[in-house]
Image (cartoon, helix red, strand yellow):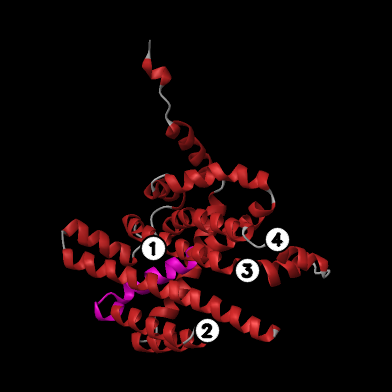
Amino acid sequence: MNLDLLRFSPGAYLAPVVDWLNRNFHPFFDAVTKFIEAVLGGIEAALLYPPPYAVIVAAVLLAAFIAGTRVAVVTALALAFCLLVGLWTASMQTLALVTVAVTISVFIAFPLGILASRYRNFEASIRPLLDMMQTVPPWVYLIPAVIIFSLGRVPAIIATIIYGIPPMLRLTTLAFNQVPKNFLELGHATGASPRSILFKIEIPAATPTLLVGLNQCILLSLAMVVLAGLVGAGGLGAEVTRGLTRMEMGLGLRAGLAIVAIAILLDRLSRGAVQRGQGTGAAKAT
């Protein structure tokens, strides 16, 4: 028996599809590249053009305004650490990349998660896809992304988005499924519209689990930053890669700790902003 006939190579079927997409949708991919590069360039310019101390002061004031004093202190410590270890530019590049990737991931995953909580058939149909997206090694996503978008930050963001969507989508579905049914029945009994029930009952009740999903999305996106350094995305991932190739433990450790600092900053800032907004809404309601 010829064993070659029994072998299955997904790449033999996927590679022609990627080549076809690259040939026929190149203008679209080029437009996506220019748009993402423009957004990233704008954020990086806003972070890197002013002196680092001015950025730190502005970030601390913003954090105090939207999330409170404790988050402002965490913001100051995290950004000061990135500056003191000599990785300010790389840290700001990583912060811009992760901010764009997480924002796009949430905008995709949040509505899909709501749909999955509403329609069981839809949730069952996307579950295998989510399993595959979370199980396939993340660096595999970089291969087709680089083929389509070439080297640079864009394929890194695309791969990061693919890796960040599943946890946010799953936890959004879980959050809305856990909303107490009596809350929904009360909303319907008072004659509230579906939009009012969504924004005034379901989302506030689901916020704790949604925050867990956002936290996981941020952490997984930062985990992809290191791999993104392999395709020329720059930032702290490039520094970790450089430390690995040169066997410089100090550089790799400094870059790794800077990634941790950025992760803590984004997590505390997003969590504090949502919790303060939730508290303000409750105060207005009373």
Residue 77 drawn at (x, y percent): 33, 82
Tell me which segment is drawn in magenta.
82-101
* Disc number lying in front (4 or 2): 4
- The answer to the question of whether label 4 and label 2 lie on touching residues, with beta carbons closer than 8 A, is no
Of tags 4 and 1, which is closer to the observer?
4
Closer to the chain start, of discs 4 and 1, is 4
- At 77% from the left and 67% from the top, the residue drawn is 186
Mark 1 highlights which residue?
A: 222
Closer to the camera: disc 1 or disc 2? 2
Residue highlighted by disc 4: 181
Q: Earlier in the sequence, mark 2 or mark 3?
A: 2
SS of the residue at dot 4?
helix
Instruction: Tell me the residue at 53%/39% (across/down).
Output: 20
Q: Amino acid at mark 1?
A: Leu
* Mark-to-mark CA distance, 1 and 2: 23 Å
Q: Is residue 148 left or right of residue 255?
A: right
Residue to which mark 3 is pinned:
205
Element type where label 2 sits in the image: helix
Query: In this orientation, which residue lies closer to the viewer: 9 or 64?
Result: 64
